[in-house]
Image (cartoon, helix red, strand yellow):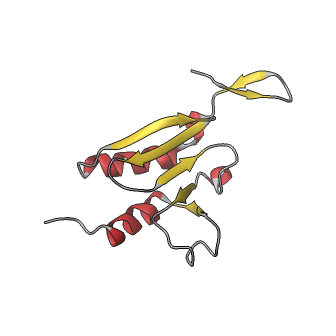
């Protein structure tokens, strides 16, 4: 489904093929048995995990999207975010590792 429009040309754009990092992170969490929900957001995606208070986005305008990197809100402290509410330019591995740093795996 193409639901993002380029207002300069008036044409619809489907950029989902270029947003691979967020789909990779989604698979990493699903492989661990977590209930990860990936939904469309603008021309990209938003990822949330049931029971946890953070979300990951990758779409036109998110921090790092031009390099196929992710933006996160929550999970990181304000010090880590340098006073901003979000932290961007992250890889799937960085977010995955941070998640398990904050929420250690139950054995």
Q: Residue furthest right?
A: 8
Percent position of residue 24, x then y: 42, 48
Relative height, residue 15 to residue 61 (above, below): above
Quick one: quadrant of the N terminus?
A: top right
72 vs 23, left or right, is: right
Quarter of the image for residue 93 reads bottom left
Q: Residue at x 50, y 52 (%)?
A: 56
62 vs 22, left or right, is: right
Q: Residue furthest bottom?
A: 79
Percent position of residue 76, x then y: 49, 69
Relative height, residue 10 to residue 44 (above, below): above
Percent position of residue 28, x then y: 34, 51
Q: Residue at x 58, y 47 (%)?
A: 58
Q: Residue at x 48, y 52 (%)?
A: 55
Q: Residue at x 64, y 50 (%)?
A: 65
> What is the total number of numbered labels drawn onto the structure image?
0
Front residue of 12/20: it is 12
Q: Residue furthest left?
A: 107
Percent position of residue 6, x then y: 78, 29
32 vs 74, left or right, is: left
Quick one: quadrant of the C terminus?
A: bottom left
């Amino acid at each position: 489904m193409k639901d993002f429009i380029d207002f300069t040309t008036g044409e619809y754009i489907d950029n989902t093929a270029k947003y691979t990092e967020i789909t990779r992170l989604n698979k990493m969490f699903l492989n661990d048995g977590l209930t990860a929900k990936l939904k469309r957001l603008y021309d990209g995606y938003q990822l949330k995990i049931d029971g946890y208070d953070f979300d990951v986005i990758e779409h036109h305008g998110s921090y790092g999207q031009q390099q196929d990197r992710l933006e996160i809100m929550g999970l990181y402290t304000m010090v880590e975010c340098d006073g901003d509410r979000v932290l961007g330019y992250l890889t799937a591995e960085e977010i995955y590792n941070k998640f398990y740093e904050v929420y250690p795996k139950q054995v």
